[in-house]
């Protein structure tokens, strides 16, 4: 198995002994540059790209810069022929550049961590907002439900859903999401384009 990372993430893996449990003879690491095409499988072109975010929690030192586009928070674009699929499991905000990149995609798997920005605080399970954690909320001002809905993406699927996010079960929030043409990802989900 091969793990493809940016140079910054590769360095994080090398600097933290916990990641040494991955035997390099069985799990190789390959660094790729942002926006450099690579082929994880024959006939599949992939490309990592920076998305607004922050450093991982275990690397925070004080208040981190939020919505920074760097090698620490990335999405991946997968292409086969004319089909384009994006996977963006963590994203602090939808920048103009990111919106342009995603526009008209065949499918998008996107950060559905929190339904509302203050969800963790309101539920008593945390003391940070979603944006402070590097995740844009689904609903509310600047939320992904409205911003992604305007990009003409054929299939929009929320992934990386926190257990406090009410869209993981039936209810008004899930109906709201599905009513706007979004899907909620689930274990074992397969899609055909």
Image (spheres, rainbow, N blue to C red):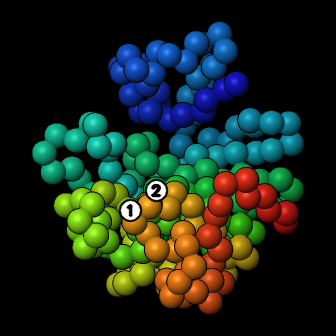
User: Do the residues under discs 2 and 1 have CB atoms within 8 angstroms?
Assistant: yes
Residue 153 visible, this orientation: yes
Between disc 2 and disc 1, whose residue precedes? Answer: 2
Image coordinates of residue 7 in percent, x first then y, are: 47, 30
Q: Secondary structure at mark 2?
A: loop
Drawn side of residue 128 relative to residue 11, left or right: left
Look at the image and tell me in which quarter the N terminus lies: top right
147 vs 88: above or below: below
Q: Which mark is residue 92?
A: none
Q: Residue at x 50, y 62 (%)?
A: 161
Residue 132 visible, this orientation: no
Specify the quadrant of the image occupied by residue 190. bottom right
Q: Residue at x 62, y 70 (%)?
A: 184
106 vs 47: above or below: below
Q: Nearer the viewer, residue 126 or 26?
A: 126
Q: Which residue is mark 1?
A: 135
Q: Secondary structure at mark 1?
A: loop
């Amino acid at each position: 198995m091969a793990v493809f990372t940016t140079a910054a993430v590769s360095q994080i893996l090398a600097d933290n002994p916990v990641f040494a449990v991955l035997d390099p003879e069985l799990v190789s690491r390959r660094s790729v540059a942002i926006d450099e095409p690579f082929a994880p499988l024959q006939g599949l072109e992939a490309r990592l790209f920076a998305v607004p975010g922050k450093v991982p929690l275990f690397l925070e030192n004080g208040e981190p810069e939020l919505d920074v586009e760097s090698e620490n928070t990335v999405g991946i674009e997968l292409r086969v022929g004319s089909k384009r699929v994006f996977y963006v499991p963590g994203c602090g905000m939808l920048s103009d550049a990111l919106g342009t990149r995603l526009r008209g995609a065949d499918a998008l798997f996107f950060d559905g961590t929190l339904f509302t920005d203050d969800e963790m605080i309101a539920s008593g399970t945390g003391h940070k907002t979603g944006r402070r954690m590097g995740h844009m909320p689904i609903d509310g001002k600047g939320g992904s439900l409205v911003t992604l809905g305007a990009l003409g993406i054929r299939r929009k699927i929320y992934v990386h859903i926190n257990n406090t996010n009410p869209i993981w079960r039936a209810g008004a929030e899930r109906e709201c999401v599905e009513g706007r043409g979004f899907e909620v990802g689930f274990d074992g989900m397969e899609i055909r384009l």
